[in-house]
Image: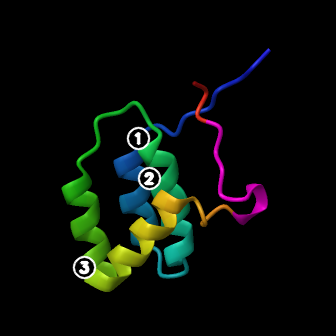
């Protein structure tokens, strides 16, 4: 039996993480990566704006590159099984 897990309330999770100074760009990239796989409608503009406010435009770029490449999850070679 195959089980598929999906992050829910992605916007809320990322926006909450951004409020905590101990959360790193890698942490946000991991959540961002999971959100990319979510079936929810996500306001990416809102999330990206909050990331820029916390770090900068270059910080957003690093987070997006790390999330899209999957490098934020080193344990599995950056791969997340998408259930398809």
Where on the picture, by quarter, is residue 9? top left
Q: Main secondary structure of the magenta part?
A: loop
The answer to whether marks 2 and 3 mark residues whose Cβ atoms lie closer than 8 Å is no
Report the coloring of the rendering.
rainbow
The answer to whether marks 1 and 2 mark residues whose Cβ atoms lie closer than 8 Å is yes
Where on the picture, by quarter, is residue 58? bottom left
Residue 20 visible in image? yes
Residue at the location (25% across, 79% down)? 53
Q: Is residue 55 magenta?
A: no
Neighbor class of circle 3 (other Cα within 10 Å; few <14, some 14-19, many 20+) is few
- The earlier-in-sequence mark between 2 and 3 is 2
Residue at the location (28% across, 60% down)? 47
Note whether 47 is above or below 42 in the view shown.
below
Q: Which residues are magenta?
A: 74-81
Per the model, the C-alpha gap separating discs 1 and 2 is 6 Å
Q: Position of residue 83 (x, y in %)?
A: 61, 27
Residue furthest to the top in view is: 1
Note whether 73 is above or below 12 in the view shown.
below
Residue at the location (55% across, 80% down)? 22
Per the model, the C-alpha gap separating discs 1 and 3 is 21 Å
The front one of 60 and 77 is 77
Using the image, tell me which numbered label, if any, was put on residue 13: 2
Q: Is residue 31 left or right of residue 75?
A: left
Q: Position of residue 62 (x, y in %)?
A: 42, 77
Per the model, the C-alpha gap separating discs 2 and 3 is 17 Å
The front one of 84 and 60 is 84
Identify the residue position indicated by label 3 in the image: 53
Q: Position of residue 46 (x, y in %)?
A: 21, 58
**What element does badge 3 sit on?**
helix
Q: Is residue 36 left or right of residue 45?
A: right
Using the image, tell me which numbered label, if any, was put on residue 9: 1
Residue at the location (40% across, 66% down)? 64
């Amino acid at each position: 039996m195959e089980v598929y897990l999906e992050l829910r309330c992605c916007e809320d999770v990322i926006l909450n993480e951004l409020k905590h100074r101990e959360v790193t760009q890698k942490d946000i990239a991991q959540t961002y990566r999971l959100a990319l796989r979510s079936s929810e409608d996500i306001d990416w503009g809102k999330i990206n704006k909050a990331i820029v406010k916390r770090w900068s435009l270059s910080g957003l770029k690093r987070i997006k590159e790390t999330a899209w490449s999957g490098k934020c999850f080193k344990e599995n070679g950056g791969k997340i099984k998408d259930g398809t």
